[in-house]
Amino acid sequence: MRVVIENVEKRFGDSKKKEVTALKNINFSIEEQEFVVLVGPSGCGKSTLLNIVGGLLSPSQGEVYFEGNEDKDPALGIVFQEIALLPWRTVYQNVIYGLEERGIGRKECQEIGQHYIDMVGLTGFEKAYPKQLSGGMKQRAGIARALAVEPDLLLMDEPFSALDAQTRTIMQEELLTIWNRTKLSTLYVTHNIQEAVYLADRVIVLSRHPGEIKEIIKIDLPRMGRDQEQYRKQFERYSDEIWNLIRHDAQAAIKEA
Ligand SMILES: Nc1ncnc2c1ncn2[C@@H]1O[C@H](COP(=O)(O)OP(=O)(O)OP(=O)(O)O)[C@@H](O)[C@H]1O
Ligand SMILES: [Mg+2]
C-alpha cells in the first residue's frame, strides 16, 4: 500500500490574526515497504503532520490517501513518545487491545499477541503491569501493540526520545531488526539526525514557520549495519547535509523557546 500526502496545509487558531500556519505545501508519498523519517527542529510541525497522516487531525487543505487496497480501511499502528499503555492491563492485555477492539477471538489474540511480545523481546513479561516495566520495556510493549494489528502503515512519533542514550541505541537496533522482518511502510518522526540516517530509506527535512519540505534525501546505504566503520564517512556526510539544512531553523527555535 502506498500513502500519498498531497498539498497538505494546516492552520491552527480561529481568529485570522492569531492563526499559525503549522504546515504548508506538503507533498510526498510513503511507498510500500518504505521507511520514511521526518526530521526538523522543535515546532516545525512533525507531530502535526504525523497526526494528519494517521487521521487524528484533519488538514486545513489538501488530503492524505491510501493507494492499493481501496476496499478496506487501512489499519494503522501508532507509537507515541509517551506510550499510553493502559495501567490496569497487563503487557499481554495491552498488546492485544487493538485486536479485541476488532472482535478477534481469544485464541487468535493469544497467537498474535505472543508472536509480537516475543518479537520485541518481552517474553516472560506477559503478565507484568506497566508500572513494573522500565521505560525501554514500556516502549517495547507499545511497539508490540502497534504491530499486533498488522498495520498497513506504522507511525512513530519520537518513540525513543524519553529513553537514556544506551537504551535508545539498543532500541534503534532492535527496531531495525523488527522492521527487517515486517517491512511495514513506516513514517517515523525524530529530531535526532543520527537516528534518521540510521533508520531511513528517505529523510524528509522540514523547515519551520511555516513547516515546509526543505529537502528529501535518499539514504543510499545498506539497510542493516550502517553504523559499521566502512560506512562512517558516508554516514557523516548525510548527517552533515541534514544538519546544514536545519541548523539555522534549530538555532531560531532555541532562541524562541
Ligand atoms: N492544537 C494546536 N493549537 C495551536 N497550535 C498548535 C497546535 N498543535 C500544534 N500547534 C503549533 O503548530 C506548530 C507545530 O507543532 P508540532 O507539535 O507539530 O511541532 P513538532 O515539530 O512536533 O515539535 P517538537 O519537535 O517540539 O515535538 C507549533 O508552532 C505549535 O505551536
Ligand atoms: Mg512533536
Image: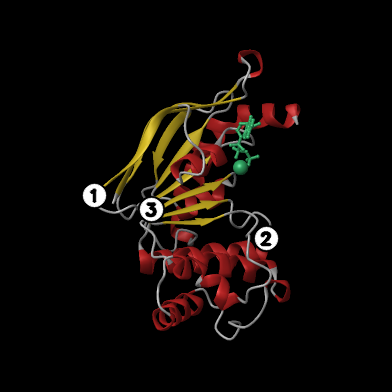
- What residue would you read off at disc 1? 68
Q: 205 left or right of 65? A: right
User: At 51% across and 44% down in the image, what residue appears?
Assistant: 56
- What residue would you read off at disc 2? 165
Q: Amino acid at mark 2?
A: Ala
Q: Secondary structure at mark 3?
A: loop
- What residue would you read off at disc 3? 221
Q: Secondary structure at mark 1?
A: loop
Q: 226 left or right of 22? A: left
Q: Quadrant of ligand 1?
A: top right
Q: Secondary structure at mark 2?
A: helix
Q: Nearer the viewer, residue 153 or 257?
A: 153
Residue 228 at x, y percent in the picture: 48, 62
Can residue 26 be seen at all in this image of the molecule? no
Q: Amino acid at mark 3?
A: Leu
Please report whichever mark, 3 or 1, sits nearer to the chain's N-terminal start.
1
Can residue 226 be seen at all in this image of the molecule? yes
Q: Residue furthest bottom?
A: 124
